[in-house]
Every structure is written in C-alpha cells, then in structure tokens.
Image (cartoon, coloured by chain):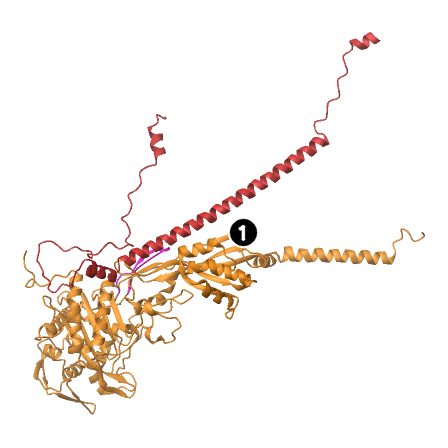
Chain colours: A orange, B red
Amino acid sequence: MARTGRFTWRLALLASVLFLSTFGIVGRLAYIQIVHHDRYSLEAQAEHLDKREVRSSRGAILDRNGFPLATSLDVYDVYIDRRAWPDPSVAKDVATQLAPMLGKPPEQLLTRFLDDSNGPVELLGDGVDFDIGRQIEDMALTGVTVAHGTKRFYPEGDVGSALLGFLGRDHSGLSGLEADFDDLLGGQPGAIYFERDGGGQPIAFGRSRVDEGRPGADVRLTIDRYLQRLIENQLDIEIQQHQASGGTIIIMDPKTGAIMAMASRPSFKLSQLSLDDTNQDLYRNRAVTDLYEPGSVLKVVTMATAIDLDLVNPNTTYYDSGTVEKGGYTFKNWDFTANGTTTMTQLLQKSLNTGAIWLSDQIGATRLYDSLKRFGFGDSTHSGLGGEASGLLRTNKDTGWYSADLATNSYGQGIAATPLQVITAISAVINGGHLMRPYIISEVDGPNGRRVYDPVVVRQVISEKSSATLAEMMHQVVDGVPAHRAQVKGYDVGGKTGTTLVSIPTGYALDSTLATFVGFAPAQNPAFIMLVKIDQPKDDPLGGIVAAPVFGKLAPSILQYLNIAPNSQLARSP
Amino acid sequence: MATLDRLAPPASAPAAPAWTPRRAIAAALTLVVAIALFQVVQSSSFTHTGQNMQRLETQRSDLTAQIHQVEAEIAALSSLDRTERAARERLGMVQARRIEHVSVGVEAPSGPLLPRPLTNRPASAEPKGEPWWQSLIKALPLP
C-alpha cells in the first residue's frame, strides 16, 4: 500500500513510451495528411479510380465534291474472359446464347471458349455490327464484354487504295493519306475516369467523369472519285495489255497544282488487305516515292530554258547530223536518224537528242542546272504526301560530274525525278510559268473550325510569254504530227512523249523501258494535265506507242466530265 | 382566513419551461431525421440523375451510330460502282458509242452534274424570328 500513488520510474517510462508513440503517430499522420497530402491523395485516387481511353471518332476522307472515300462506322469488339467460367456448363450456356448473335454454330464457339491457349482474355469478334453489339451488351452474359469501337468503311471500294492507305489494329494510320494526315483525321482520344472495385470493374453509379476528347476532322481532298476510278481502271487495262510491270497516271490542275487523280501500280486492294502481310512493297504511293529518268519529256524544260533566255524561238534552226560528240562519247537520236536543218518545234516533234544537246550548249551548264533546280528537280515538291522523294540532280558544281552529263541531262537521262515532280515541272511550263506546289488536301473541317487550303505559287520559273510559246510548241508536238496517238477529236491538246531505259545498278537494262507521256488539254487554256507512265511494256518500248494512246483514250471522258466545250467545228447548232 | 383565502386569486401556475430536455431531444431527433431524409432524397435524386444521364448517353451513342450508319448507306448507294451497275443492269444503259456535241447559247452549269453529296452543308439557316413570349409581351398593353 505504501507504493500506491507514487510516480515510479516504471510508470514514467510507460507514460513516456505512450506519449512518444502517440506523438509519433500524430506526427506521421500530419506528415501523410498535411505535408504530403497531394501525393497520397493521388495514390489513393489511383487505387480507387481507373481510366479507360475512349477512341475519338475518326474523320472522313472526302473527294473534291464531298463524296466519302473513307468513313467510319460504329461497331463493337466482343471479348471473352474465361476466368468467369469455372464450370464448362456456364461456357456452354454462354456459347448457346451468343452463337446466333455472331452467326456461328454454338459448338464452334464452345470449342474456342474451352481452348485457353491464347490466355484467359481473348478478342472473340472485332467489328461486330453496332446493333448486334448493343444486344450482346444488354444480354450481360457471364464472361463476355463488349467494347465500343469504329471500323473504316470505303464506299468506293478499292478506288484509291494506295493513295488512301489503311489503318492498323489500333486505328492509327499505317500508310497513305491515313498515315500522312493521321493527326488531323484521328483527333484526340477521350477518357472515362471511374471508381473501380477490387476486380477493376467500374462500380455501378460510382463517381465517374467523361473526357470527350476531340473528334477527328473531315479531310476534303482535291481528288475526284470519278477521275480516280477512270484512271485506275484504264491503268489496269493498259498494264495487262502491254504486260507491263507497273505504271502511274496522275491528273493535275496545272493552274493550281491540285492533284485531281493519282494512281500507281503494282499496288494493293483495300478489300483484300491483310494486316498480317509483311510485304510492304505494295503499300507505297509510287507516284511520289519512286524515281525514274524522265527522258525526252525533259526536252520541254530544256527548250523552255532556252526560249526564256531568248536564245532561240520556235523557228530557230540547227543542223542535225544525227550524231554529237561530247566528252568522249557519241550521242545519237533515239531513232538513229539525221534530219538536217531542223526548227525548234520540229526538234520537239521528232524528239531529237542531238537537238537537246545543241540547246544545252547554247544555254551552258550553269544556267541549265539553275533552271532545272528552279523547275523543282532535285527537291521534294512538299506536297505533304508521305515518303516523297527529292530526286537526283548532279550539277556541274558536284563532284563526279562530267561534261557528257550535260548532254544526257538535256534530254532527261542521268537525272531522276518522281512522276509528281515531272508533272509539276511541265505544269509550270504551260501555266504561265508558275511553279505550283502540288497539293491534295483542299479543306479540313473539324472541331477547331474549317480550314481551306489555297494554291501556293512556289516561284515564277519562266515568263508568261515563254510559257505561251512552249504551250503552242507542245500543241504542235501532238496536233502538228499526223496520226499522233494522243490526239483527241474536237479538242486541241499538247504533250510530249518520253522513253527511257530502266536504270539498274550496273547501268541500263537495254531491253527494258519506261514509256511516258505528259499531255494537257485544251491546249490554249489547259483544264488538266496528265502524266502517263507505263513500266517495262513487253509489246513495244516507245512512249509514243504505249503511253500517248492512254492519254488519247482518257482525255475525251475527262474533258466531257469537266464540262469543257469542244472546238466549234465539232459542235453543231441545234 | 378561509374566506379571505377563497377570495384571493389563485396562485398562478409556474410557467412551463419553453425548452425542456424532452423537447430538445425531440427537436434534435426531428432534425436528424430531416437531415437523413434530405440525404436519402438527395442521394436518390443523384442516382436517378445518374441513371438518366447514362440513358441519355446511351441514346446519344445509338443515334450517333445510326447517323454514321445512314451516312455510310447513302455513300454506298451513291458509289460509282453501284450507279454504273444499276445503269447497266436495271436500266439497260450502255456506254455511249458516239457523242454528239450541240452548241447552245447558254453557259454550262458551273457545278458538276452529280447528285448532291451527302456532306454538302445546307445553306445557312435563316435567322430565327423572335420567341413567342417576346411577341406576347409586345402585344400586351404594358407601360
């Protein structure tokens, strides 16, 4: 009893321990809840809240008249989670109910349900019709979940496959315009933030927040679906007819640089696309990625340079002896002819190599290469199309240049360009001398408003007078030559053929050519310019025989479609 | 004294206190019940609104999907392949072998001779008139 009420050292120790413990706990609580409030608050939220990304609707790709070439449909992806079926009888029941919705036999579904080689969770069906997906969702089957998604739909079928490109499984663009303008088309994905239970599932009526994201913009192209379909069908026919390895056709508005149609082969078909196919060779747009030697088409640029420098005019003559010696090499005309005194117009009509070399001598190396650069050779056109090549242009200022190069370059050999570069350069020759930037998007209409793309003049390369002279000379190249295969009844057209040997690592394949033709109509006021390139035709090597007729076949339909009136001689009064 | 006592006014009863513990408890209970009811009503309303929102979002999603579906159907119906097939098979049309050009003194239409694309924007809507209630206010003989 004597010790009752005494504050012994043991009691003091106990009190101290209790006090320190309490102080420690309070201190720790203050540290967690006050000092690091934000951090622990976020951690707690992360523990309780979950986020699910919601894909924004992808914008449509429209042709120049507003017809959709690619658009999106709402669909559902159906997933199964085998962990929810401890008993096969449950899986069987689910298979029986799900089978009629997916149009598959229940046995087939059950076999797949019970095969867990792909893990517990598996995508059962992607791109399931929206109404069916919604019905499956409403059925709330055990172990079956659906996810809202979209599927790309191509109303015009395979038209413009390589140009449009395609999407990957994550719905981002993998090739073509879908990839080039993925940011515009894809928009910004949204998200759903929700409270989740221990299993990670959303708590019914728990806290949730929806971030809508930003839908993708509709992209209106300069491409015309009618023209695109027209040239693709014709290109396929020509390739088959000439047993060619491929080909390219481009139609452009020479005054604006708007690409109205663009097709290249070999290519793929959207309807037969397999994302598992690793051969990517077919996916590129060869009209902008592949280089070739323009050949005699380039004589037009050489001529334009000489005329713009006032060195020659259409009636200026030179003497064609059939051969020219340059840098230790002998150059001959493509048909080995000697034409004697020849005018500049005849030079183009007969496509004489000796004449182009004579012109290059008049111009000089520095001025010719400067001119070629001004026409856009050796530099990308900056059209915005993916994978666009810059081309190859070796000038007299580069190492490894020989004087013979000037001769070959003057008629389009030893210089490499894309079909788009060539048609852009020839457009500048005939449109008043303006080098236009080729473009394929005319308008973007999205949540941030509407943006219209105007034509861009890169530079003036020759005078308007020189351009008019060249347009008339090119008119004479087609309509001034009897039975030229690019002629169109009732319309004045102009153009120039080209035939080049296919370059290989060791030089040129002597038995293989690229047959090309660049033409425009009407000659006096061109509504369109078209480049035709047929690769390695087996029946005939010449551009005048293989490529020019393609222009002759397509131009009437194009002119009628564009409402271009024929010559007064052809039209009769009612 | 007895008479006096009888005549004397009765002593007034002591006034009952206005705030007894029983009343306080009752008031507190009432308040608690009211607060609880308010909570229940609010929670119920919140849940109901949440359900409504979900229903409306589902409805919106359905309608958006329907719009996309209809747009795709229109696009498919106006596709060039289908148009050509219908022209050839249903209407028995063939490719023109000879094209006759007739010169007329009227300018050609500026736009393409095609059906109106589905994405063509409608002409800008006329500005709406004033609402009915504003007309009513104006009609009333107010100062």
Q: Residue furthest bottom?
A: A328
Give the position of the C terminus of chain A as an image quadrant.
bottom left
- Residue shown at the point (28%, 43%) measured from the top left: B126
Reading the image, the residue beneath label 1 is A204
Q: Is residue A299 visible?
A: no
User: How far across and how far down the image is residue A459, in percent?
Assistant: 24, 68
Q: Secondary structure at mark 1?
A: loop
Q: Which residues are magenta?
A: A440-456
> In the shown orientation, is residue A46 left or right of residue A330?
right
Chain for numbered disc 1:
A
Total numbered circles: 1
Crowdedness of circle 1 by 10 Å Cα count: few (<14), some, many (20+)?
A: few
Name which quarter of the figure residue A131 lies in.
bottom left
Q: Quadrant of residue A234?
A: bottom left
Q: Position of residue A572 (x, y in %)?
A: 5, 60
- Tell me: residue B1, above or below residue A279: above
